[in-house]
Image (cartoon, grey):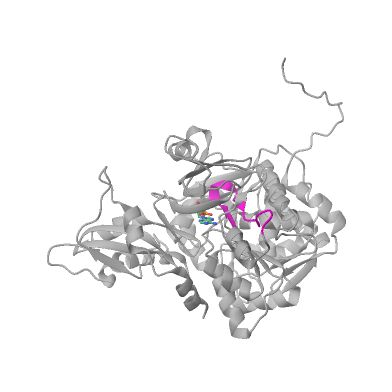
């Protein structure tokens, strides 16, 4: 028998899962709830709705239309939240521009995404000055002065708040196909240029609902309607892990910290009663160090950690100061959330058992299938010991790298998205990442491409062979080091090896995070059976000091 389908009456509404609908209930239940920006601005959800309408109007006045890409270059702000809604709700595509890439890479991403209108914070004017001539598709820039004095740059069509105030709040938003692309951004790959990922309305709505679901489980640390939310993850990076959408859907108070300043973050946390945030381990360390300096009590602050492994040492440091800390896992290609940690069912309630469970990589969130497989795509035993690659299926994974069929095919080989993360899984579904197949290094939340650094270093006088690897670092999660074979009679130093990297930083081709702070000299680089440099072995050989000691240092 064929599948059966309902026969909707003519007037039955075909409800699309579009981002605007995340606002429907919140505007009814939370019209007077507040959105706060630093110590500069506060307004209600009712005004948020108007500000979203105003932004859509002003963008339309500047020539925006459905299908157009609109880029944002800003710190974590109410403006970004407005763009998270207004741009996709107009049927346009929001490009959350990674401002930490090198200028050449930022220009590449704007051109590749065909961004035509940009909203730019004044801190990024120098960057725009440098790249605008090489971005011919950009036809309008809106300057975000953020309270700063001074003239607008000549290329700006106006200032965000001024244009917003003059624009009508009544924008005629309409429903449309939920499969329209809502957002795009770029992730740094192993080789070549950054790779573009994109997500549809339907995907982001489902991601929002599913991310909220585990928070509702009893006895698990979570986000509820009484919470006050403040992101500490850049909003350009994977929708700030999707939580601004969750928080807005719930209609809870939201606090946006702008550019991260430890003291302001703690002021906001105390003054506004922030109870839920998320960040990479490096930012948590920064917050803990600042809190220690001023003797702040961090009780009642739930921090979700992702982007890199949460060490038990860091978990302890935060817990000691009253925080609840939970790890999560995802990646740019996955919108991002795949897994979140939770307490074991039937755990004894002790700090030790909490620590063991909450510092794992996580258990899948609803609607996510995760498998740990060997090279033949066979599931490894769920014994918490056998390693394999994490592959996944979920409704919100990027269907491709934009305009890059070869890498898209590799990403989706065999119908499962390949994360290139190596992990174990146990009988209760707890995943633990152990290693990485991708030859990239993640430092302070940013990717460094080891092959690019090797190319740059390879020509340096005195260097016969080089391998760049990531080693654990208590402060930055990982740092790149160069393992060098010296040419006959030569003695390469950190300064000589860094010289070509510094030149590449200066001309804007690589990020300053790529500069090395350590080199190691060896007689020969180990090779695998197929003659590739055995980076796994090098990583094991040059892994840094135990994290627990180093974390204590960083926090002190
Ligand atoms: P990104 O695409 O920049 O968000 O980076 C995603 C990658 O960060 C993943 O593929 C992992 O390699 C790493 N990552 C994210 N969360 C964790 C975690 N909880 N533990 C270890 N590595 C993680």
Horizontally, residue 77 falls left or right of residue 359, namely right
Residue at the extreme bottom of the image, as rendered: 294
Instruction: Indicate whether residue 170 is drawn in magenta.
Output: no
Return the x and y of residue 9 as percentages of the image width and height. 87, 26
Q: Is residue 61 visible?
A: no
Of the 4 image quadrants, the one containing the N terminus is: top right
Horizontally, residue 255 falls left or right of residue 374, namely right
Return the x and y of residue 149 as percentages of the image width and height. 63, 77
The residue drawn where x is 59% and y is 82% is 292
Considering depth in this image, is 287 or 185 the residue closer to the camera? Answer: 287
Return the x and y of residue 58 as percentages of the image width and height. 71, 56
Horizontally, residue 278 falls left or right of residue 417, namely right
The residue drawn where x is 82% and y is 23% is 7
Horizontally, residue 16 falls left or right of residue 495, namely right
Q: Is residue 245 visible?
A: yes
Considering depth in this image, is 289 or 549 the residue closer to the camera? Answer: 549
**368 shown above or below 23:** above
* Image quadrant in which you'd find residue 371: top right
Considering depth in this image, is 215 or 42 the residue closer to the camera? Answer: 215
Return the x and y of residue 360 as percentages of the image width and height. 56, 57
The residue drawn where x is 66% and y is 39% is 180
**461 shown above or below 438:** below
Q: Where are the magenta residues, as a range?
A: 326-347
Considering depth in this image, is 496 or 366 the residue closer to the camera? Answer: 366
Instruction: Indicate whether residue 340 is drawn in magenta.
Output: yes
């Amino acid at each position: 028998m064929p599948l059966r389908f309902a026969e909707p009456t003519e007037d039955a509404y075909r409800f699309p899962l579009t981002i605007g609908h995340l606002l429907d209930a919140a505007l009814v239940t939370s019209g007077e709830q507040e959105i706060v920006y630093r110590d500069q601005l506060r307004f209600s959800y009712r005004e948020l709705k108007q500000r979203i309408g105003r932004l859509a109007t002003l963008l339309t006045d500047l020539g925006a239309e459905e299908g157009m890409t609109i880029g944002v270059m800003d710190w974590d702000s109410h403006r970004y939240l407005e763009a998270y809604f207004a741009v996709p709700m107009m049927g346009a595509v929001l490009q959350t521009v990674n401002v930490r890439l090198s200028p050449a890479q930022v220009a590449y991403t704007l051109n590749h995404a065909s961004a035509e209108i940009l909203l730019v914070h004044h801190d990024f004017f120098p960057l725009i000055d440098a790249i605008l001539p090489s971005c011919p598709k950009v036809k309008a820039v809106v300057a975000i002065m953020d309270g700063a004095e001074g003239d607008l740059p000549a290329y700006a069509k106006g200032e965000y708040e001024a244009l917003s105030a003059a624009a009508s709040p009544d924008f005629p938003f309409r429903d449309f196909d939920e499969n329209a692309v809502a957002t795009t951004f770029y992730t740094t790959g192993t080789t070549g240029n950054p790779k573009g990922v994109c997500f549809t309305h339907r995907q982001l709505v489902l991601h929002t609902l599913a991310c909220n679901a585990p928070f509702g489980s009893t006895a698990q640390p979570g986000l509820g309607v009484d919470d006050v939310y403040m992101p500490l993850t850049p909003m350009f990076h994977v929708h700030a892990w999707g939580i601004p959408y969750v928080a807005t859907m719930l209609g809870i108070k939201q606090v946006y910290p702008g550019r991260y300043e430890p003291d302001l973050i703690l002021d906001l946390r105390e003054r506004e009663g922030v109870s839920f945030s998320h960040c990479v381990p490096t930012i948590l360390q920064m917050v803990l160090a600042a809190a220690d300096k001023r003797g702040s009590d961090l009780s009642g602050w739930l921090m979700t950690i992702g982007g890199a492994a949460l060490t038990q040492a860091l978990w302890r440091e935060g817990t000691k100061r009253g925080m609840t800390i939970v790890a999560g896992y995802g990646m740019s290609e996955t919108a991002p959330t795949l897994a979140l940690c939770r307490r074991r069912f039937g755990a004894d309630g002790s700090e030790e058992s909490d620590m063991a469970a909450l510092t794992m990589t996580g258990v899948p969130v609803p609607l996510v299938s995760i498998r740990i497989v060997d090279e033949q795509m066979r599931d490894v035993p769920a014994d918490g010991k056998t390693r394999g690659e994490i592959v996944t299926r979920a409704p919100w994974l990027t269907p491709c790298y934009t305009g890059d069929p070869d890498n898209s095919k590799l990403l989706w080989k065999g119908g499962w998205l390949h994360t290139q993360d190596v992990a174990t899984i146990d009988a209760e579904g707890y995943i633990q990442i152990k290693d990485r197949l991708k030859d990239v290094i993640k430092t302070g939340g940013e990717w460094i491409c080891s092959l690019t650094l090797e190319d740059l270093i390879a020509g340096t006088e005195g260097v016969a062979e080089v391998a760049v690897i990531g080693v654990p670092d208590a402060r930055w999660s990982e740092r790149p080091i160069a393992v060098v074979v010296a040419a006959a009679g030569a003695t390469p130093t950190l300064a000589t090896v860094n010289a070509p990297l510094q030149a590449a930083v200066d001309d804007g081709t690589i990020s300053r995070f790529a500069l090395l702070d350590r080199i190691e000299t060896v007689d020969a680089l180990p090779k695998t059976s197929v003659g590739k440099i055995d980076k796994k072995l090098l990583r094991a050989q040059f892994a840094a000091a135990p994290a627990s000691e180093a974390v204590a240092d960083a926090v002190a």
